[in-house]
Image (tube, rainbow, N blue to C red):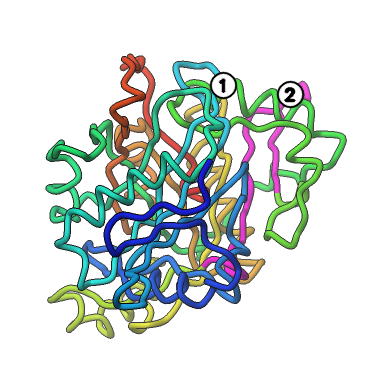
Amino acid sequence: MSEVYTDSNLLYRRATKDDDETLKRLLSENSMDSWVNLCLERSPSYFDAQGLMGESYTMIASDIQENKSVGMYSCSYMNMHINTKEENIAYFGELRLHKEYRNKIRVLKNGYKSLQKLLPVQKSSPIYITSIASENTKARRVLEANLKGMPKYTPLAEMSTLIFSTQFLSKRKKLRIASQEDIPRLVKFYNHKAQSYQFSPCLNEEWLSGLSSERGLDINDFYIREDAHGDIEACFALWDQRMFKQTVIKSYKAPLSLVRPLYNLFAKLSNRVELPKENSMLEQMYISFFACDKRGLVLECIKEAASLARVKGASSCVLGLSSQHPSLALIKRKLKANVYKTCIEMVHFEDEQQDILLNEGLLIQPEVALL
């Protein structure tokens, strides 16, 4: 494994903590384009958000002649379910390029070469997965064109990230906080349900036992609901990532940018998410590792999760579901959720081309809090 990869005047290398400000600036200056332009920022340090579940590496690209950074990407190796089995899969993300280099395909091509040369091969599956904003047609047009020297991008399915208000009253209090003693059966229940979804994370007892509140999550942030026999029938975690990972609104598209104050008045009266000012952060928590044994309990559990998040200081909750999830329409309507859509894509490199036949009967649903 090499330490650097160079091509002409471009140099690619693994980022260190000395690159902290540069990485944060690249994230801040590259918004994700949709009905709202937002940035996923990292503060106080970019590296505080690395390795949330598994190993994570970040690469940075520099123009040697100009002596400046031109881009970055990250690669995280996580155990996920694929065709109901546990596999170590690489998630390719945070691809950001300085605006002067976005139309230079050579920068992209060499970036993909550097990924194979600079990163350890830790995955058991020959694929990478990534997510791209569904409305980011410019990026998708280039990445999905299967250009020579580029990996093959294959769109798999669409994810819907729902953002909804925490101003819901939960009438039934049937959830309880999980404890260390609950970990073995919590892991068993979650993985049994999660294996029905492609690319859902695999929980394990060691990871749960070692969680620290420094990452905004420990076992006491997990909640379980039990039936009359004491068996788990639903679980989730409220993951507060605001201390190290922020979603910042950069701008709104017209006409929303013009009517935002009026919309917020309407939102406040109707229990919808109010839209913050431009360049401000969403006060949100993730409903993560959600699993439910009965479809009729899904909405009730999510409402109670929102109520709990409000007590913890969040004005909104985030939940990622497959756009084909059977409860999506109900949740969106009842919780009056805003939706941000992304396309989940499979990435193949030429020397790793193997046929991966995904079970089409399983919905594609990675954990949005880990993307």
Magenta span of residues = 222-245
Number of numbered discs on residues: 2
Q: Choose top left, top right, bottom left or bottom right for residue 45.
A: bottom right
Q: With respect to residue 67, does 161 lie above or below?
A: above
Q: Nearer the viewer, mark 2 or mark 1?
A: 1
Q: Is residue 256 left or right of residue 359?
A: left
Q: Where residue 184 sits in the image (x, y, percent)?
A: 79, 27
Q: With respect to residue 343, does 106 lie above or below?
A: below
Circle 1 sits in a helix, a strand or a loop, which is it? strand
Q: Is residue 79 visible?
A: yes
Query: Observer-nearest residue: 221 or 47?
Result: 47
Magenta stretch: residue 225 in it?
Answer: yes
- Residue at horizontal 35%, vertical 40%? 328
Q: Is residue 274 visible?
A: no
Query: Observer-nearest residue: 233 or 155?
Result: 155
Residue 231 is marked as 2
Q: Amino acid at mark 2?
A: Asp
Q: Where residue 236 sits in the image (x, y, percent)?
A: 62, 42
Residue at image mark 1: 86
Query: Observer-nearest residue: 263 or 88?
Result: 88
Q: Choose top left, top right, bottom left or bottom right for residue 61.
A: bottom left
Task: Say which label, 2 or 1, has the lower sequence index.
Answer: 1
Q: Amino acid at mark 1?
A: Glu
Q: Is residue 221 left or right of residue 101?
A: right
- Residue at horizontal 47%, vertical 23%? 125
Q: Where residue 57 sits in the image (x, y, percent)?
A: 54, 51
Query: Observer-nearest residue: 41 or 34?
Result: 41
Q: Where residue 208 sits in the image (x, y, percent)?
A: 75, 40
Callouts 2 and 1 close, C-beta under 8 Å: no
Circle 2 sits in a helix, a strand or a loop, which is it? loop
Disc 2 residue crowd, few under 14, some 14–19, many 20+, Cα 10 Å: few
